[in-house]
Amino acid sequence: MTATTTVATRPGAGLAPSAVAVALRTIRKFVRTPQLIVVGTIQGALFLLIFRYVFGGSIGVGGLPYVDFLVPGFVTTTILFAGTGAAAGVAEDVEHGFFDRLRSLPIPRLSVMAGRSLADTALLGFTLAVTTAIGFAVGFRVHTDLAASLAAFGLCVVYGFAFEWMFITMGLVARNAQAAQGLSMIVFPLTFVSSAYVPVATMPSWMRPFAENQPITVMVDAVRCLTQGSRVEALLPHHTAYYVGMSLLWTVALIAAFAPVAIARFSHR
Amino acid sequence: MEHIVEARGLTKSYGTVRALAGLDLVARRGRVAAVLGPNGAGKTTFVRAVATLVQPDGGSLRVAGFDVVRQPAHVRRVIGLAGQSAAVEDAMTGRENLEMVGRLFGLDRAAARAATTAVLDQLQLGADADRLVRTYSGGMRRRLDLGASLVGSPRLLLLDEPTTGLDPRSRIELWDAIRAMVAGGTDVLLTTQYLEEADQLAADIVIIDQGRVIAEGTPSELKSRAGRDVIEVHARDRAALPLVAEALRGLGGEPRVEIATRRVAITVDTGTDRLMDAVRALDSRGIDIEDIALRRPTLDEVFLTLTGKPIDTAEPQDRRRHPAA
């Protein structure tokens, strides 16, 4: 019975190996649950088609085709809808004792959170790529260069990593999947009261201060500027650099606000 | 160090609920200790405190000589935890689950693989090792969960109600797995609601209620205090219940009448002999009965005998057993 008698005191895994082990599990779960991928993709595609062909005809954005306006917004807000799934997954891990097992192991507490956020961000990269491909299929075109477009895609991944900490925190607070779904309602004002689908200028004046200054708007406008260039800049009060800079500030702020809370919450005894 | 777990005056409250109310409990090295108690007695809170998941409010708690409050990282290096729900990943195979936990315990790839194979064989999961856990039965999941706590070769294994919710066959399989581990030299602290489970597995039993120890000893010590067996008579007619109680009086403990189910039960020391006496006593009084049975005492009955009061459960409808007037 060597397996049960040998080691007296185990050192435990370090930060990187334990984060990798935790991340690998999240990715395996995603890859081996095809219904998640298929349903998520179909749902995203349906929404995009509805906005593009049902609402798109009556939404005037001036100066450029609606599809070129819409797709950057749609791809960016994908990070929020993907995030609700992460919140529910984290809540399930609390509910089913998986986190208790991890917290009883001799590993750094940070590694569990780091593994989870990195894995979810990697999965988000996949979702963003699929959504972008659907965007191109319905007529979206880049009017800048490849480097700027890749930068736009990279920004979306970075935003996703930042918002991931908010969703992890929500999952830890909710403690069960249904409550996490409830908290996830916050994504609706964030996505719809933003410049993602319609120009903010068309909203009533009391709504505009929120719409103009919340993180999703500057993130969407940064992506829009990077893929559409001067055609979009002409419609906006600021230049590309402003939106990229502001969105990165928001990214830092979100991580600074939520990562410590998530880690403290996870480690709390 | 002769004590693997040593709790002194341990307290923990959640709001106004006192989960642990000055718990004193010692688990000796090289023995299996069972913490027995009804729902809400504080069993899970205690195990979570030992596992460093919950910080006690007061008192002291040492695990393998380490203080859980000041040295949680040391404690985590000696324990393995299997909680009430099987904390295994559905979308991974049994082998992948154990290898992941082995890696987290700090084993290198080869060592994690070797430990996984050994544990899977030990728990008789070898044949199903490469199937996804979502295809496992409830009992197999629990065994795999047990394996996950074992794969890092813990010095102390913590099992929180390991068989709750399992069917009888799975329960016996899990008992066998736990016995095999104990034979391998692992110290075990387990919680259970079932007297039989504590009796089957543990060398020492601690009965707790409302966050305090109310009785402790070896299974035979507790049984000699609580009576070894129970004779239960199912009367045909409710009106006959006092007569049945009268007939049984003197064979063992005080008869307990349960009106709703028309049953009278007494605890006795030598089951089969007293069963014959009971049958004769009922027969000589001409009392009609539905059936008569000899069985082991339930936790409620041990509780009642040791404390003179029924288990104080949260749900009043569970307080069905009353001492005969």
Image (cartoon, coloured by chain):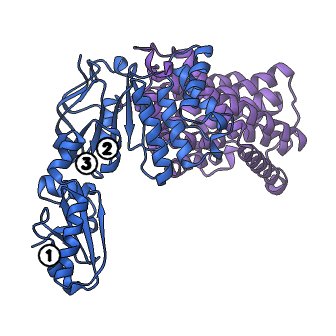
Element type at mark 3: loop
For marks 2 and 1 on the same chain, the one whose residue lies earlier in the sequence: 2
Kindly report which numbered mark, 2 or 1, lies closer to the viewer in this rendering: 1
Assign the C terminus of chain B to one quadrant of the image. Answer: bottom left
Q: Secondary structure at mark 2?
A: helix
The residue where tag 2 is placed is B198
Picture coordinates of residue A25 (x, y %)? 62, 31
Residue B247's label in the rendered image is 1
Q: Where on the picture, by quarter, is residue A234?
A: top right
What amino acid type is highlighted by mark number 2? Ala
**Which badge, 2 or 3, is on the more N-terminal residue?**
3
Relative horizontal placement of residue A137, taking residue A81 as reference (left or right): right
**Marks 2 and 3 close (CB-CB < 8 Å):** no
User: x and y percent of residue B111 in the render?
Assistant: 58, 15
Does label 1 or label 3 sit earlier along the sequence?
3
Asked if both marks, 2 and 3, belong to the same chain, the answer given is: yes
Crowding around mark 1 (Cα neighbors within 10 Å: few <14, some 14 to 19, many 20+) is many
| Structural crowding at the residue carrying mark 3, measured as other residues with C-alpha within 10 Å and reported as few (<14), some (14–19) or many (≥20) | many
Question: Drawn colour of chain B?
Answer: blue
| Residue B18 is at least partly visible in this image | no
Please name the residue shown 23% across and 73% down the image: B279
Say what amino acid the circle numbered 1 marks: Ala
Query: What letter labels the chain drawn in purple?
Result: A
Residue at image coords 44%, 24%: A105
Return the residue at label 3. B41
Residue A37 visible in the picture: yes
Chain letter of disc 1? B
Q: In the image shown, does B270 or B20 lie closer to the viewer?
A: B270
